[in-house]
Image (spheres, rainbow, N blue to C red):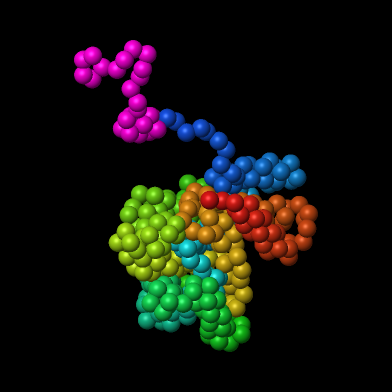
Amino acid sequence: MPSGQMPAGQTSAPTPATEVRAVSTAKPARRFDPHRFGPVVGLILLLVIGTALNPDFATWGNLMNVLTRTAFIGIISIGMCFVIISGGIDLSVGSMAALIAGSMILVMNALAASVGSPVAVVALGVLFALLLGGGFGLAHGYLITRGRIEPFIVTLGTLGIFRAVLTWLADGGAITLDNDLSDAYGPVYYGNLLGIPIPVWVFLAVSVAGAVLLNRTAFGRYVQAIGSNEQVARFAAVDVDRVKLLTYGLLGVCVGIATVLYVPRLGSASPTTGLLWELEAIAAVIVGGTSFKGGEGRIAGTVIGAVLLSVISNILNLTSIISVYLNAAVQGCVIIAVAFLQRRRP
């Protein structure tokens, strides 16, 4: 028998290369992933329910109102998504926003006398808020990475520190923006472009930037790798401490952006500013399909989660099914329910 030929009736055994090609060309079976599509289905159902309960729910004005109010928490949630994917947590974002708002107003009021243009004062105030937010976030990251303190403990401590400092600065009351500055600053919240409020445009821009950063850059891949297995990431020469530091810094900047949009809404900051924002931000991330254990998450899901929670609150406000004072209780129940559903998640 010539070499290289097999006896009749026999076939050659598949080689490893053949098996790899067979596996790579085989298409995986399509199946419904509740963690990926669940938030979308839930949002659609809520939209249908809201429209059925109150015809005013489906109006353009109400939609823009919902998205505008979502912008603050949504922007913070995008930064929180990076932190949670990396295996961390930040409980202080609401208190941080309150202190940034109060400090920003004090700085702007102080500059009003020396800087002639209100617009220039507002621009300097915005820059100050972003730098302060980034600084607070980097401080968290430094304590967590260099101090080797658990994120829960660090941010739980600063939660109290930030709000206490604001209360001291406000002397237990409110810090109010100067009237001339308030008029110049108002369009940042109340203005619109092409019929869409400015906060919604900013929310959209931050969402796109966050998605690109998470899915199209080495930094985003490192964040997911650290959340999946930090030890393996270290063995793969990933600078884990630096990446964690940057994730908390990024979250701080997002809090700064949200605060910049929030301040012109009321023109003041008080000890109740940003109350329970951390609950809403974490809820939006988890409802959006991000694993609370880290390693996996999507910006698009986080955005949908933030909108979904705002829609729930809006429906409760329009229909009076339950007291508006129970909105936080509903959000807490949503967090627990989603965490329960994630128990068997790989």
Q: Taking 119 as reference, is 69 left or right?
A: right
Q: Which residue occupies 36% across, 69% down? A: 241
Percent position (x, y) of residue 331? 66, 60
Q: Which residues are magenta?
A: 1-25
Q: Is residue 136 visible?
A: no
From this viewpoint, which residue is outermost toward the left? 2
158 up-or-down from 50: above or below: below
Give the image location of residue 273, x and y in percent: 59, 72
Q: Quadrant of residue 168?
A: bottom right
Q: Quadrant of residue 18?
A: top left
Residue furthest out toward the top? 8
Residue drawn 47% across the image and 33% down it:
28
x then y, percent, for residue 329: 71, 63
Q: In the rendered image of this protein, does residue 242 appear above or below residue 46?
A: below
Q: Main secondary structure of the magenta part?
A: loop
Q: Work out whether residue 83 or residue 229 is closer to the camera in this orientation and state it.
A: 229
Q: Is 74 displayed left or right of 130 in the figure?
A: right
Horizontal arrangement in the rendering, residue 310 relative to residue 122 (left or right):
right
Q: Position of residue 175 (x, y in %)?
A: 55, 79
Q: How many marks?
A: 0
